[in-house]
Image: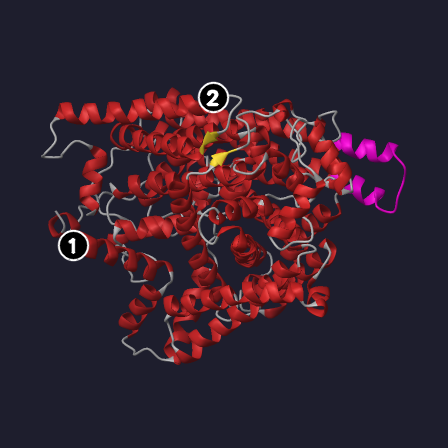
Amino acid sequence: MGSGFDTMLDGTSLTDMNKTASICAWLAVGLLGAAAVGVIAVRRGEPINALWLVVAATCCYALGYRFYSKFIATKILALDALRATPAERLENGRDFLVTNKWVVFGHHFAAIAGPGPLVGPVLAAQFGYLPGTMWVLAGAVFAGCVQDFVILLFSVRRDGKSLTEMAKEEIGRVGGFVAYTAVIAILVILLGVAALIVVNALKDSPWGTFTIAMTIPIALLMGLYLRRIRPGKVLEVSVLGFILVLGAIFGGQWASQNPAMAHAFTLQGSTLAKLIIIYGFAASALPVWLLLAPRDYLSTFVKLGTIALLGIGIVVLHPTLHMPALTRFVDGTGPVFAGKIFPFAFITIACGAISGFHSLISSGTTPKLIARETETRMVGYGAMMAESAVAVMAIIAACVLQPGVYFAINSPAGVVGQTAATATATISSWGFPVTAGDMQALAHAVGEQTLFNRTGGAPAFAVGMAHIFSQSLGGAAVMALWYHFAVMFEALFILTILDAGTRVARFMIQDALGHIYKPLGRTSWYPSILATSALVVGAWGFFLWQGVKDPLGGINSLWPLFGIANQLLATVALCVATTIITKMHRTRYAAVTLVPLAWLVAVTFTASWHKIFDRNPRVGFLAQARALAAGPATNATARLIFNNRLDAAVTAVLVVMVALVLIESVRQWIAVLNGTGEVRVKEAPFVMTRLAEERP
Amino acid sequence: MSRFVTAARIVLATLREIFDEAAYERFLRRTQTASSPGAYAAFRREFDEAKTRRPKCC
């Protein structure tokens, strides 16, 4: 089946379709895609159906895979099916293992798909559905898929080396250092902003808080079941865990209606933030098998199922998009986050278009599982297309909402006003009519006390998803259950990223500290575990606390910081890729990675400049600090001023690192082109595969 | 029908790989032990050290 699918996509070796028919078929795909993109881009003033986005995305991905990825595979990378991969040469039954390409594809997709492609597109929907959709499609086909594909192949040819190792080898020590620092920075900022999304989704929500709280004992039970009762039966225990989580959703409904329980589980943002910080520390220090591993399995199970369900739901129910193609907020005055389309749409949507973090996965586990070089195209380029499709689903989920409702959920009280009356009046004055009564009825329908000021994207996505499913599956009567299922799904896998990310960052810091004092590098030495866990949790906890206390909702400051850090890592990955392509004497094709690199540098530098120096206090950190200093002093003023200055400093450090790695890379390219630099490609030696005989 | 069976097998194999059941089976084969709470504990000790170092994307 697999090879049949491939040959159909390749369109070159089908025996029952001659060349003319193939050309006609691909022309039809191109025309259909052009028509769909045309409708998305040109239609104004009336709602369009979500299927136009689905058709446009499907055609763009098909064309991108068939033509662009094949061009890269043949002309630049020269994929060689006869060259043995590290999975074959170094097979050890653990890390290195020859694996079926579809299995690797699923494994890789499960590792790259996180909350990013859901949250970023929902936030960027404030510009309308057009900018986000165009960036997701073009960004994925010409940048994100390319990055994942080439980094995967280069890692395969270097025995599965990590991005940090490749950056050190190909660009120099600066490249390695920047990659390492960028990973730590991304992890810390990501964990802070991810925790903030959960806080904003759960604050004043006894139903949601109860459901998520129950996932902790459920995970512990799963851990004990796996360890003591049915060792290794992960799929079985994941199904059981999923059933228990569904029970917890119903339990949450009961808790929200029981006065004593509702009181106990109605928590403010600051209380939830403290609880999440404590949870993060405990999860990092507890044995993996007890909490982290079962939660990870449960989260993956729910994630894959929900994404599949949402995809089917959108195609079958094909809802109407109520958000206009472009809103007035393209001018930079948006309430969700401040800043113009360029550059802010392009750092707000990272995962789904291009995400530097993917390069860590493409140079981590996946290259050690690839059986043949030719499979990197399907796994690297193809899995990123699937992630991009998830981002399209998120855009649809956000844009099926009435725009007034979308802005009421996503706008911070500091922008639209503290009360329902002022918030709806402000939003209606923008041309997006909504009433306090509408919002109250919606909150009641989804089982919440209020939906105002729920920034972060997750609640808006959950309302959109509930809206789509409630059209047919159970109707309005079960909208509350769908909403809380969606909130549970998002919170569950965000919290899983929180505990897994804390542990990854802890290991990285322990590795580094081990060079200074050896015992600190021992991952089993408890003083080191506690100290480094506290350091990591303290770092992301700082950003979380800052977000919770931010009068502008936190997302306005933290999501752009995360976007800049993530695109910095993509810049490093594309610098590595361009350097290797140059050394491979494929310079005339270097534009394939050079153009996305130039685009990312332009985006990252411009966004950083605005975030630091823009005179608008809603955009620039320093302007915000100045505005706070000039305004009436409160107990929080000094802390808020410090936070803004710190954010400006963090942004400046990130952009200096981009500049450093870029300068180093350009020096390498010039040296190679002038013949004064080392041009040796640091690949593992060619070894003929044995698999070619076994699997023709 | 056979295509459907093949597809179902691949989906199941993918899930078993994602959920580490396949890794546990390989561990049992490699160490030539039968599945038991002790064997699973040993597998987790070896496996978690590597797995928890792998970043998961955002």
Closer to the observer: label 1 or label 2?
2
- Residue A533 pos. (x, y %): 62, 61
Q: Residue A331: image x %, image y %?
A: 64, 22
Alpha carbon distance from label 1 to label 2: 44 Å
- Is residue A86 at least partly visible in the picture? no
- The image shows residue A464, relative to residue A77, as above or below, that is below
Which residue, given by chain and number where applicable, does mark 2 sit on? A43
The chain identifier of the residue carrying mark 2 reads: A
Percent across and percent down for residue A596 are: 45, 27
Residue A166 can be seen, yes or no: yes
Q: How many marks?
A: 2
Looking at the image, which residue is at 37% across and 49% down?
A108
Q: Residues within 10 Å of mark 1 (few under 14, many from 20)?
A: few
Residue at image location 26% in from the left, 27% down from the top? A75
Instruction: Return the residue nearer the eye: A308 or A620.
Output: A308
How many C-alpha atoms fall within 10 Å of the one at disc 2: few (<14), some, or many (≥20)? few
Q: Which mark is residue B1?
A: 1
In the rendered structure, which segment of residues is drawn in magenta? A622-644
Along the horizontal axis of the image, is A464 left or right of A376? right
The kind of residue tagged 2 is Arg
Q: Chain of mark 1?
A: B
Give the structural element (helix, strand or loop) at label 2. Answer: loop
